[in-house]
Image (cartoon, rainbow, N blue to C red):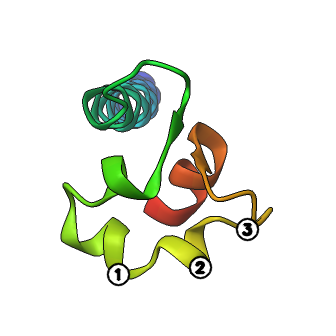
């Protein structure tokens, strides 16, 4: 029983670590694309990534002409 609990705890820890690393990767990619470091992606900045460029209007849910980090994360999910 102790071994099963230990295995479960290790699996939970691995999942939490993987989720955290994924979040860091998403943030890092957003920051890499955000050339002017203003916290949003313009259509020109998004143009560096074909998928973002093709889906810009869909990703820009508030229709302000910019992709926020939150909109980026929702799209990546």
What secondary structure is marked by label 1? helix
Characterize the local packing of mark 2: few (<14), some (14-19) or many (20 or more) Cα atoms within 10 angstroms: few
Characterize the local packing of mark 1: few (<14), some (14-19) or many (20 or more) Cα atoms within 10 angstroms: few
Tell me whether the residue at label 1 lies in contact with that at label 2, contact meaning CB atoms closer than 8 angstroms: no
Which residue matches tag 3? 61
Characterize the local packing of mark 3: few (<14), some (14-19) or many (20 or more) Cα atoms within 10 angstroms: some
**Residue under the image location 31 percent in, 27 percent down:** 35
- Where residue 30 sits, quadrant-wise, is top left
Which residue matches tag 1? 54
**Residue under the image location 46 percent in, 33 percent down:** 12
**Residue under the image location 44 percent in, 79 percent down:** 55
How many tags in the picture? 3
- Residue 31 appears in view: yes
Horizontal and vertical percent position of residue 74: 60, 58
- Residue 1 appears in view: no
Q: CA distance from mark 1 to mark 2?
A: 9 Å
Which residue matches tag 2? 58
Counting residues from the N terminus, which is met first, the one under dot 1 or under dot 3?
1
Residue 42 left/right relative to 60: left
């Amino acid at each position: 029983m102790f071994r099963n609990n230990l295995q479960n705890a290790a699996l939970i820890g691995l999942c939490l670590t993987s989720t955290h690393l994924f979040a860091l990767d998403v943030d890092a990619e957003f920051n890499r694309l955000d050339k002017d470091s203003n916290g949003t992606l313009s259509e020109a900045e998004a143009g560096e990534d074909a998928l973002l460029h093709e889906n810009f209007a869909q990703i820009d849910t508030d229709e302000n002409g910019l992709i926020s980090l939150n909109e980026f994360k929702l799209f990546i999910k």
